Image (spheres, grey):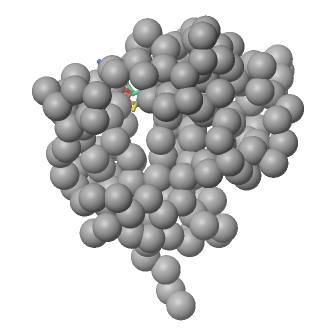
């Protein structure tokens, strides 16, 4: 399977907004907590609630299947989140929502997207830290962080439910000046 990457900087272009919304809605139930609970600007339907993911303070990396032109994977990218413990890992590139479309799972799509983000950081963002987090029970995601050179940095709780633990992983990038 051939993949191409598309980087949408702070939603300057909205070309695939409908397809991205379809994907967010399709995988919403897999997230703990659910994707729609992150929306502070509530809509009436799940689709309306997903508008939260198109705010101009974050960007998006898409992996596109060369044969079908469908979205195989999606990473939200945010620069310089320095809230709370993150102050110790800043400036940073934060990988937020991470989704591989169900038909593309377990074929190395997420692994290839981490490589692409690391390449982009070296050439474009140039942040000393890449940060990302997942919930406690997401074993696949814990495996992927470790496999891709991330180390567990700290554990916090989710604002919606302080019984839910959020594991933050960090990868250090060093640059020769
Ligand atoms: C998590 C997710 C992004 C992974 O994407 P993917 O493209 O399937 O991942 P890859 O194919 O690159 O890699 C999967 C790896 O996990 C391993 N794996 C699969 N199931 C696993 C499990 N239950 N526990 C631990 N590792 C597991 C695979 O063996 C593989 O590792 P390997 O290459 O060392 O053999 C995808 O499953 C997904 O979108 N899940 C739902 C949403 C989600 O959980 N997102 C992350 C939120 S932080």
Residue shown at 53% from the left, 90% from the top: 177
Q: Quadrant of ligand 1?
A: top left
Q: Is residue 108 left or right of residue 10?
A: left
The residue furthest bottom is 177
Q: Is residue 146 left or right of residue 100?
A: left
- Looking at the image, is 27 positioned above or below residue 17? above
Which quarter of the rendering shows the N terminus?
Answer: top right
The foreground one among 70 and 159 is 159
Q: Position of residue 53 (x, y in %)?
A: 60, 33
Q: Position of residue 32 (x, y in %)?
A: 33, 20
- Looking at the image, is 153 positioned above or below residue 95? below
Residue shown at 75% from the left, 44% from the top: 11
**Residue 109 lies in quadrant:** top right
The residue furthest left is 163
Asked if residue 103 can be seen in this view, the reply is no
Residue shown at 65% from the left, 69% from the top: 123
**Residue 102 lies in quadrant:** top right
Q: Position of residue 28 (x, y in %)?
A: 49, 14
- Looking at the image, is 108 positioned above or below residue 133? above
Residue shown at 77% from the left, 27% from the top: 17
Q: Position of residue 61 (x, y in %)?
A: 66, 42
The foreground one among 29 and 37 is 37
Asked if residue 53 can be seen in this view, the reply is yes
């Amino acid at each position: 399977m051939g993949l191409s990457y598309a980087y949408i900087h702070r939603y300057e272009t909205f070309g695939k907004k409908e397809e991205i919304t379809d994907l967010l809605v399709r995988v919403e139930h897999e997230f703990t907590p659910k994707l729609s609970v992150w929306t502070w600007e509530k809509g009436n339907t799940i689709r309306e609630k997903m508008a939260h993911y198109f705010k101009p303070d974050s960007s998006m990396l898409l992996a596109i299947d060369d044969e079908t032109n469908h979205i195989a994977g999606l990473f939200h990218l945010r620069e310089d989140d320095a809230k709370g413990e993150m102050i110790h890992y800043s400036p940073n590139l934060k990988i937020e929502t991470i989704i591989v479309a169900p038909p593309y799972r377990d074929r190395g799509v997420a692994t290839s997207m981490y490589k692409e983000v690391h390449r982009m950081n070296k050439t474009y963002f140039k942040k000393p830290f890449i940060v990302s987090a997942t919930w406690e029970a997401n074993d696949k995601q814990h495996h992927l962080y470790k496999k891709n050179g991330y180390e567990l940095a700290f554990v916090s709780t989710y604002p919606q439910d302080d019984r839910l633990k959020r594991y933050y992983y960090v990868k250090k990038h060093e640059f020769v000046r």
